[in-house]
């Protein structure tokens, strides 16, 4: 990966970070009493929408020019439908994992599912935009650089630890702590991922060859 490509990747990642910041401040101008804690579910939907809207920019900046066959309308429609199915599968998979790890099964179903949506937005949407519905390509990319995905999941897991504690804090309500941890982890991954690629670009180039 060339230095100019790494810079472009860093700029697009910073754009994703900026979209999260906008999702915190812009809604307060249009929604009364908006806040991350008090209207957390609303913020989850807005943040997911902002990040999802920005990720296609990452695709157009980083992805090489597609062939004429792949640029046909039928191919684009098929690819889009497959990506939607993969995203929904990712959301349901995360939802099941959360329930298996102790999330309420019947109560707070919407909260748990929106947590799955935001985590899928952080982990699955970038893969869909860059690699499309290709699991083998996902595994190859993840084996070389899965920093953003790992940091999002680890952040959500670490922030789940204080939930059972009897501190009676507003952010301990399910799943506020986990979603904030996933968001912070996602931002950290966006910043460190291009730096990691830059430091290991020679090894990555050798592997690609």
Image (cartoon, rainbow, N blue to C red):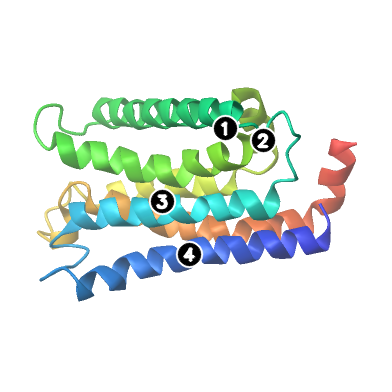
Number of marks drawn: 4
- The answer for how far apart the CA atoms under marks 2 and 3 are is 37 Å
User: In x, y percent, where is residue 38?
Assistant: 13, 62
Secondary element under disc 4, as helix, strand or loop, is: helix
Q: Name the residue under label 3.
A: 155
Is residue 158 shown left or right of residue 82?
Answer: left
Within-10-Å neighbours for mark 1: few <14, some 14–19, many 20+: few
Q: Are marks 2 and 3 in contact (CB under 8 Å)?
A: no
- The answer for how far apart the CA atoms under marks 3 and 1 are is 34 Å
Task: Work out whether 203 lies above or below 61.
Answer: above
Residue at screen point 18% across, 62% down: 37
Task: Work out whether 205 lies above or below 53.
Answer: above
Q: Earlier in the sequence, mark 4 or mark 1?
A: 4
Secondary element under disc 1, as helix, strand or loop, is: helix
Is residue 7 shown left or right of residue 99?
Answer: right
Is residue 160 shown left or right of residue 33?
Answer: right
Q: Mark 4 points at which residue?
A: 17
Q: Which of marks 3 and 4 is nearer the N terminus?
A: 4
Q: Name the residue under label 1.
A: 76
User: In x, y percent, where is residue 66?
Assistant: 73, 39
Residue at screen point 33% across, 64% down: 23
Q: Which of marks 3 and 1 is in front?
A: 1
Q: Name the residue under label 2.
A: 71
Q: Earlier in the sequence, mark 4 or mark 2?
A: 4
Q: Which of marks 2 and 3 is nearer the N terminus?
A: 2
As drawn, which residue projects farthest toward the bottom?
Answer: 29
Within-10-Å neighbours for mark 4: few <14, some 14–19, many 20+: many
Secondary element under disc 2, as helix, strand or loop, is: loop
Secondary element under disc 3, as helix, strand or loop, is: helix
Q: In which quadrant is the C terminus drawn? A: top right
Q: Which of marks 4 and 2 is in front?
A: 2
- The answer for how far apart the CA atoms under marks 4 and 2 are is 29 Å
């Amino acid at each position: 990966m060339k230095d100019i490509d790494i810079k472009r990747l860093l700029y697009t990642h910073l754009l994703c970070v900026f979209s999260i910041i906008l999702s915190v401040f812009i809604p307060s101008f249009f929604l009364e009493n908006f806040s991350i804690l008090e209207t957390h579910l609303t913020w989850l939907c807005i943040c997911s929408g902002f990040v999802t809207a920005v990720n296609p920019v990452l695709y157009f900046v980083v992805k090489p020019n597609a062939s004429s066959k792949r640029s046909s309308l039928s191919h684009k429609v098929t690819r889009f439908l497959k990506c939607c199915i993969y995203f929904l599968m990712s959301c349901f998979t995360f939802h099941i994992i959360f329930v298996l790890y102790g999330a309420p099964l019947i109560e707070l179903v919407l909260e748990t599912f929106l947590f799955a949506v935001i985590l899928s937005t952080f982990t699955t949407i970038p893969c869909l935009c860059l690699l499309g519905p290709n699991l083998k390509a996902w595994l190859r990319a993840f084996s070389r650089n899965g920093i953003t995905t790992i940091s999002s999941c680890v952040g959500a897991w670490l922030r789940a630890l204080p939930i059972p504690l009897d501190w009676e804090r507003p952010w301990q309500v399910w799943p506020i702590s986990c979603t904030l941890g996933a968001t912070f982890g996602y931002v950290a991954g966006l910043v460190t991922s291009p730096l990691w690629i830059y430091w290991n670009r020679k090894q990555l180039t050798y592997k690609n060859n």
